[in-house]
Amino acid sequence: MAAAALQRVLRGRAAWWCLPVCLGIVLILPLFLVDIPPLTDYPNHLAREFVLAYGAHDPVISRMYATHWGIIPNLAIDVAMPALAQIVPLYLAGKIILAVTLLLPVAGAAAYHRAVFGYRSLWPLASGLVAYNGLFLLGFLNFQISLGLAMLGAAAWVRWRDRRPLLLAVLGAVWSSVIFFAHVFGLLFLAAIIGGWEFQRLLNLRRDGKAIWPQLAGSAARVTAVFALPCGLCLLAPIAARGGGMVWRPLLDRLLWLLLPFFSYTIVSGVLAGAAILALLYVLARHRMFGLAPGAVFTMTPLLAAYMVSPFVANGTGFVGERLPIMLGFMLFAAGRPMRLSSAARVATVGLLTAAFALKMTTICEIWYDHNSDLAEMRRVIAPVPAGSRVIAVSVYAADNPAYWQSMQPGRVIPALFPTYIHLPALLLMEHRAFWPLLFTARGKQPLTLRPPYDRLDGHQGEPPDYHVLQHPISTKEAAVAPYLAQWQTDFDYVLLLNAGGARDLPNYVPDRLRLVTHGDVAALFRIVPGAPSATAATR
């Protein structure tokens, strides 16, 4: 009776909207706990937006960087955040963009679900579970924004395909081009959803004994109208010119990363939550209490197959195939629906989803709040760095001190993925206007480039090297991976050592060339001694 009463209440439009609003508030709640969340790439993105927003008029920053706009399929935050930063402070602008990144895919999932099933449902709101996924924690903001745009575009396709074909062709071409510039993987997602929908329509016609060729021609014309422009942009974009080989991950990693939609800062909670949810959906499907929207099978199956054979790194871009499980995660809630649930199944479904969501959000809130201490310590350590300085970052890694890593504060590493601290040196640029060689400035991926002579210090978007690298002459191989290492003693003013609490004999770290300025557990700052004996010649 209580469930029936709740259902009657939710039939009202105003009452139903209370639930999405509450969900949205909970999703953005962690943003109020810290000014720079522990998302791996986020500080780097924020620093790039700082340069784009203020660098042209800053006498120090303008000597280091220049804008380089072009046909780049990775521009969502680069267009939005600098403009927003002209109105509100940069860190607040970043939080607004993070809120959009979290909420837009959930809104897209709800819109697509409403379009394909024709009614409002609570089920797509459960996509909030996927909002804080493994790749969001890595800071892949443009990618996640593009997924939300893709699902909104797919919802418009379903609604307007037959009723307003001309409007769909015009607005669809514009929308798909917007998705292309947000992130090219969003365009792939849109194509996969629309392709599955259209393929299902043709199968239905054939099953009913109707001629499919006229419909096939109509589908081809509609798809061409929507995708012709962004496909042309793909040909003009310098995607293929980035170079670099391909890397595949082991099969065991692939199976684990299928649960990326449910990952959090603890591997156990992410794996258990993801496995439990997938097991529940499998049981419901076996009992015919869960189904997919028309065409969803033809969207999700190719995405899953492509994931199993796709590389981890291709064309200088990492986590290539691993983006596909995130699409699949959102599709479970955008294109799925529970049907004819028994009382026990309803309780199990609601209980499991609520518990998984509460656990994930509680963990994120705790870790983000605790991250304030790391930020405060990093700011204290880098406080002596003057504007215009050049700072090289190195790090203590797990192989150097496993015991330190095992006792490390939660949130500094996303298990099975990446550390979250590697781009914290971006604070040097944003808060001290100091040069740091690992800012994202890859041609064809970001609208920013280095001016001479800083261009020869480009870090190629890599990670900070192991701190032992400065204790011996730089090899040819090391200089090829990180060119800024070749003459580090003369090219830089300071060394910032990350994870300094795990370094052994910190005061005697390269004592003939470095002087310890200040230190903590998060980092230590060393001043490079001018004119000290050099040990940087490439020898190996």
Image (tube, rainbow, N blue to C red):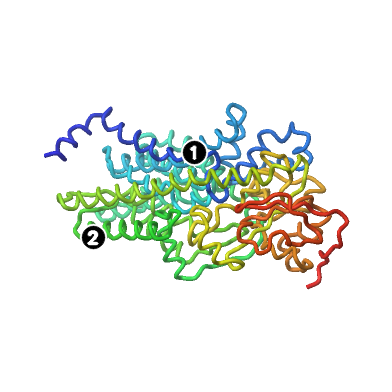
Q: Position of residue 186 (x, y in %)?
A: 49, 47
- Mark with earlier residue (1, 2): 1
Residue count near mark 2 (Cα–Cα under 10 Å), binned few <14, some 14–19, many ≥20: some
Q: Position of residue 66 (x, y in %)?
A: 74, 41
Whether residue 514 is visible, yes or no, is yes
Q: Tag 1's secondary structure?
A: helix
Q: Residue at x 72, y 40 (%)?
A: 433
Image quarter (top left, top right, bottom left or bottom right) of the C terminus: bottom right
Residue 36, position as x, y percentages in the image: 55, 42
Which residue lies under the disc numbered 1?
175
Q: Position of residue 97 (x, y in %)?
A: 52, 37
Q: Is residue 138 left or right of residue 510?
A: left
Q: Look at the image and tell me whether residue 293 can be seen.
A: no
Q: Up-down: is 9 above or below 205?
A: above
On the image, numbered disc 2 is attached to which residue? 283
Q: Nearer the viewer, residue 113 or 478?
A: 478
